[in-house]
Amino acid sequence: THQWRGIIEEYRDRLPVSDSTPVVTLREGGTPLVPARVLSERTGCEVHLKVEGANPTGSFKDRGMTMAITRAKEEGAQAVICASTGNTSASAAAYAVRAGMVCAVLVPQGKIALGKMGQALVHGAKILQVDGNFDDCLTLARGLSDNYPVSLVNSVNPVRIEGQKTAAFEIVDMLGDAPDIHVLPVGNAGNITAYWKGYTEYAADGVATRKPRMWGFQASGSAPIVRGEVVKDPSTIATAIRIGNPASWQYALAARDESGGSIDEVTDREILRAYRLLASQEGVFVEPASAASVAGLLKAAEQGKVDPGQRIVCTVTGNGLKDPDWAVAGAPQPVTVPVDAAAAAERLGLV
Ligand code: F0G
């Protein structure tokens, strides 16, 4: 029997590894591309969801982390460090365990979802909560990796981008060609950079006949690329993308401009509406930041910017279980019943 071997083995010839590279993997990637019936109806298009919450630690970060930790291992590193809004730290912590390395993580105090904190803790990472935002954490992490024996595994490490580009390969491999439009949330802007690199490589090699337009969406309170200036005090309920000074800003602009795409914003209200729609209409439970892609698509459709008949892929970046507070908040409290079939049937509206 065969199982998916992880992105490095599946795409070895397109990644910077050699035969002697010690591959550190949790068999990430190979995630579902799920047809989205309701989103397709609403847009008049063929919409698919690339469900990255199905990765081993519940987010797309695992694609980049298998590469970053593998290469750190190859170079003899004994410790890695990252700044994170939560998912990078969860992923780094897990892959560091596989590699037998120490993992240090810097997170903005009080601004990471509980599930992500739990992951970093249970995998035994050394966690520092920084009295600042993600951008401050990244500055600190860069400084530490410059001056101490610890290697940086944020997406400013180019091998992270190499790993994450495999999501674009998988989509083309599944659909037979690139979609017309690819939609995704933008935070530190590594992922939009990575997808564009993947699509560009496949098109250059003739595996795909074309490249999609890249549509990125930031949260309105954390939308530096849309505003064209650093946001000093970013805010949004989508804590994963609460970032005011994205490291890959220039690459995101290049992806936008070279693809004829756009980078726009969605409000927290629009994000939560898409979050609920995904769960209640498509059966896909994502974390709030992930819903920014779908919120953006719906906003564009309402503005008449989506021509019908196109093939569209939305990446949903992280699993809903990471941040369940938003699923519980505002939902009706379950009622309590005695151990009694008649009472249960009545409460369920079966009689
Ligand atoms: N969606 C989720 C669930 C994320 O965790 C992130 C980034 C993004 C989208 C945005 O991706 O940064 O490549 O533009 N999370 C990082 C972290 C910042 O630390 O986990 P991006």
Image (tube, rainbow, N blue to C red):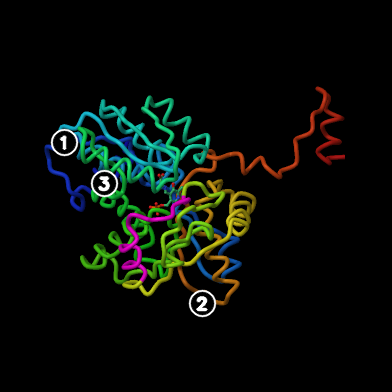
Q: Residue at x 50, y 74 (%)?
A: 309
Nearer the N terminus, badge 3 or badge 1?
3
Q: How many marks?
A: 3
Instruction: Estimate the x, y position of residue 246 in percent, counting from the top left.
Output: 37, 55
Q: Is residue 78 left or right of residue 182?
A: left
Q: Which region shows up in magenta?
A: 241-256
Q: Marks 1/2: CA distance?
A: 47 Å
Q: Of the residues shown, which amino acid type is indicated by label 3? A: Glu
Q: Of 236 and 301, which appears nearest the observer?
A: 236
Q: Of the residues shown, which amino acid type is indicated by label 1? A: Glu
Nearer the N terminus, badge 2 or badge 3?
3
Nearer the N terminus, badge 1 or badge 2?
1
Judging by the rendered image, the residue that carries numbered circle 3 is 10
Mark 1 C-beta closer than 8 Å to ligand 1: no
Q: Marks 3/1: CA distance?
A: 19 Å
Instruction: Estimate the x, y position of residue 157 in percent, counting from the top left.
Output: 25, 48
Judging by the rendered image, the residue that carries numbered circle 2 is 307
Q: Of the residues shown, which amino acid type is indicated by label 2? A: Asp
Q: Is residue 300 left or right of residue 119?
A: right
